[in-house]
Amino acid sequence: MTQLLTSQIGSGSYQVDDIQFLLRPLNISPTDVAQKERLIQSGQKHYSEMISTEHAPSANHQAIFEQALAQGGARMAQAVQSLALALLPYQIDGQLTLLSLVRAGVPLGVLLTRALRDMGVTVAHYGISIIRDRGIDVQAINDICQVHTPQSLIFVDGWTGKGAIAKELAHTLATQITYPIEPRLVTLTDPCGVAWLAAAHDDWLIPSGILGATVSGLVSRSIWPQDVGWHGCVRCDDLQSFDNSRYLIETVNHLRQQLTPQKAAVWPVEHRNILQAASQKVISDIATRFNISSINRIKSGIAEATRAVMRRVPEHVLVSSKQDNDVRLLVQLAQQAGVAVEEVGQQLHPYRALTIIKKVG
C-alpha cells in the first residue's frame, strides 16, 4: 500500500509499509539526566525541549525483554486481534487511518495495521507526536486530514498511566482542530479508565513497555520544535545492532496468526468510570503521603515506572510485591540506581508499580 504522507524519518527501522513517522529530524545536543530534571522542575525548560542520550540496553535488560516477550507475547497477540475486530465497524469505505502516539503507541499501531490488513481493511498508519502540556502535533493532524477522512482516524497508545496523554489528546482536538467525533484512543491496557477502547485494565508487563528506541523503530521520544512545522525527533541509528523493533512485530504477529477465533474487545463506560475513580484515589493518596504538589512527578504503571527509572531522577519506587516477576526489571534498575523499593501490597491497585521522581533544585 502507498502511504500518502512521508517524511525524512520514513518508517524508521520498520518495514516501509508498516508505518510512516510524521516527524522531522532535529539536531539537538543531549542534556545530562540530572541537569534535565533541574531544568524541568525549575520551569526553565519543558521536558520536550531536551533529550538525553539513550543508551543500549544491558545484557540483563535485553534478557528480561526476551523473557517478557516469551511470557507476554501470546497475550499481546490476543489483545491485538480483539482490538482489530472491535475496530472493523468504524471503517469508512473500507479504510481506517491509525495514528500511533510516538513512541509507546507505535508497536501496537504496527501490529494493528498488520491485523486489520489481514482482515481486508485498507490501512494508513502514521506515527505522530503528542506532548504533555503542549498537545498533539496540530500540523501533522491537519496534514493527515487533508488526505484522509477525519472520521476514519483512530489514535493508538500502548497503555495509560494517569491519563494525562488522553486528556491532552481530547483537549487539543476540541480546541485546535476541527474533529467531528469523540477521540478514539485505543490501548492494550487502560488501568486509569480513560481510553475509548482497551483490551484490558490490569497493569501487566507489556514487552514493548520496557525498552525505548530499540523497540520503537530506532526513533527517539518526540521533541518540541522551535519553529512552525511537525514535531521533531532524533534517529537512534547508533543502537541499530540492539534493535528489537521488527523482532517484536514478527514474533507477536506470527502468534496472532496462529490464534483460534477471538472476540472483539469491549470497553464499557461504566467500567472506565470505576477505574478512573480507583486510579485517582491512588494518585491522590501517594501525593498526600509524599507531599507531592505536582502529580507529574508520579509515574504510575509498570511501563511508566520503569521508563522513569531509566530516563529521569527517581526517588522512590513502590511495588505491590517485590516477588512479582513483572516488576523484576524495575526493581533491579532501582537497586542499581540506589533507589529504595517499597512493597505496599494492594494500596497501588489498579497499578502494580509506581515511581516517584525526586524533587530537585
Image (cartoon, grey):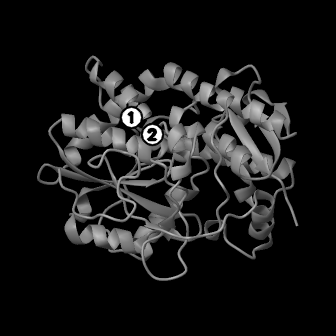
Which quarter of the figure is the C terminus placed in?
bottom right
From the viewer's perspective, tell me whether residue 234 is left or right of residue 347: left
* Residue type at the position of mark 1: Ile
The amino acid at mark 2 is: Ser
Q: Going by the image, does 169 lie left or right of 254?
A: right
Which residue is painted at 35% across and 58% down in the image? Answer: 10
Q: Which mark is residue 344?
A: none
Callout 1 touching callout 2 (CB < 8 Å)? yes
Quarter occupied by residue 358: bottom right
From this viewpoint, is residue 330 visible? yes
User: Which type of secondary structure does the marked residue at label 2 adopt?
Assistant: helix
Residue at 59% over, 69% down: 133
Q: Quadrant of residue 64?
A: top right
Residue on which the image places disc 1:
249
The quarter of the picture where residue 292 lies is bottom right
Q: Is residue 144 above or below residue 332?
A: below
Q: Which mark, residue 245?
A: 2
